[in-house]
Image (spheres, rainbow, N blue to C red):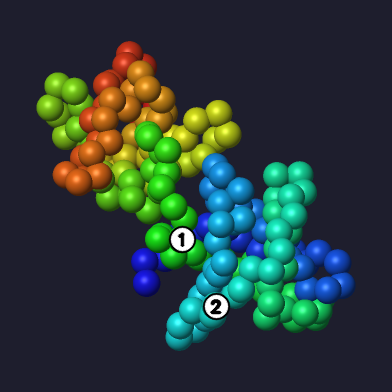
Amino acid sequence: MDLLEVGKIVNTHGLRGEVKVVPWTDYPEQFEDIETVYRKTKTDYEKLTIRGIKYQKGNIILRFAEITDINEAEKYKNQILYAERDDLGELPEGVYYIADLIGLTVVTDEGEELGKIADVINTGASDIYEVKREGMKNLLLPAIPDVVLDVDLENKKVTVHMMDGLEDLA
């Protein structure tokens, strides 16, 4: 199974076992196309079957077949939800899963290797790529078209243009 993190259960909702989920996707509607999600247990993954979805102030309310009351739902608070990559469908051009970006080598358009993507920070306006560099502070690069010129997943490489002042974001 190739699982990707898709959200986090942050609270219960109502008395019938629904849970409030913060979606970790730009497209919360993706949950409508997913039949099952998983949560990590100590030794494996527990399968949860989605039976209903509602939207509430940027969050989603999910109803699972396996959870039928608030007491059961309490046990799932603060759990990360995972979905199978194949269930998530195709992403639009220029949109990538964070899991696919982590570890990619970052090079400038002049051929200088800067380091590897260690994290992707979502700021709301645009993502920020945190680039881990040998013996230096991490570099923060805005994931905007003027900076990120090419993402090549096949060759595990991101080409960037170092605009004036970006070096100061280290």
- Residue farthest along the bottom direction in this orientation: 43
Residue at 68 percent of width and 72 percent of height: 64
Q: Where, by quadrant of the figure, is residue 140 drawn?
A: top left
Numbered disc 1: secondary structure: helix
- In this picture, residue 133 sits left or right of residue 30: left
Is there any visible trace of residue 126 in the rendered image? yes
Numbered disc 2: secondary structure: strand
Q: Nearer the viewer, mark 2 or mark 1?
A: 1
Q: Position of residue 155 (x, y in %)?
A: 16, 44
User: Which is more toward the observer, 95 or 129?
Assistant: 95
- In this picture, residue 131 sits left or right of residue 60: left
* Tag 2 residue: 47
Residue at 54 percent of width and 80 percent of height: 46
Q: Where, by quadrant of the figure, is residue 153 drawn?
A: top left
Residue at 23 percent of width and 39 percent of height: 152
- Residue farthest along the top direction in this orientation: 164
Query: At label 2, which amino acid type do we have?
Result: Lys
Q: Where, by quadrant of the figure, is residue 61 drawn?
A: bottom right
User: Which is more toward the observer, 142 or 71?
Assistant: 71
Which image quarter holds the C terminus? top left
Query: At label 1, which amino acid type do we have?
Result: Asp
Q: Which mark is residue 87?
A: 1
Q: Position of residue 105 (x, y in %)?
A: 22, 42
Residue at 76 percent of width and 68 percent of height: 18
- For the residues labelled 2 and 1, the Cα–Cα distance comes to 14 Å
Label 1 crowd (10 A; few <14 / some 14-19 / many >=20): some
